[in-house]
Image (cartoon, rainbow, N blue to C red):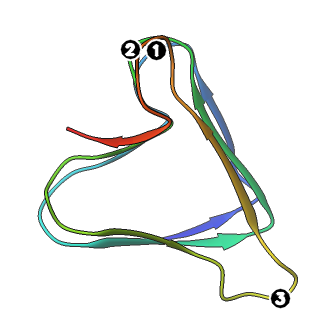
Amino acid sequence: MTLFNVDIQMSSGSAIKTTGQGAVTLELNGTNIAKSNTGGAGIQKMNIDWLVIQDNSTPDGSLTAAGGDYTADIGGS
C-alpha cells in the first residue's frame, strides 16, 4: 500500500487498520499523518505477520503516527 500525502485523524478507533493474513508493506510518499484520539492506534496491524514501513521514493517520504489515550502509536491486535 502506498501512502501519498494522507492526513487521517480519527476521533475514535485506529486511523489505519490492516485485516486479513499476510505481511503488509507501507510505502511512504510525501508527508503522511495517521492519528487517533481515543481507543485506537495510529496504525494497527491485526495479525502476527510483518508490518514493513519503507521509503523507496525520491524525495523522501515521512510518517507521523499517534495513538489515542493508552494506545500504541503503531501496534498490534
Q: Position of residue 26 (x, y in %)?
A: 49, 69
Amino acid under disc 3: Thr
Residue name at image x 21 percent, y 51 percent: 19
Marks 3 and 2, the one that precedes in the sequence:
2
- Residue beneath label 2, please? 39
Quote the CA–CA distance across marks 1 and 3: 33 Å
- For the residue pair 11 and 43, the one nearer the viewer reads as 43
Q: Quadrant of residue 4?
A: bottom right
Q: Is residue 21 above or below residue 57?
A: above
- Residue beneath label 3, please? 58
Please identify the quadrant where the C terminus is shown.
top left
Quote the CA–CA distance across marks 3 and 2: 34 Å
Quote the CA–CA distance across marks 1 and 2: 6 Å
Residue name at image x 35 percent, y 42 percent: 75
* 5 relative to 71 in the view: left or right: right
Q: Quadrant of residue 50?
A: bottom left
Marks 1 and 3, the one that precedes in the sequence:
1
| Label 1 CA crowd tier, 10 Å (few <14, some 14–19, many 20+) | some
**Residue 30 tag number:** none
Residue name at image x 16 percent, y 71 percent: 22
Is there CB contact under 8 Å for labels 1 and 2? yes
Amino acid under disc 2: Gly
Please name which of the two marks, 1 or 2, marks the residue nearer to the observer: 2
Q: Position of residue 33 (x, y in %)?
A: 69, 44
Amino acid under disc 1: Ser
Q: Is residue 53 above or below residue 73?
A: below
Q: Is residue 8 above or below residue 27?
A: above
* 23 relative to 74 in the view: left or right: left
- Residue beneath label 1, please? 12
Label 3 SS = loop
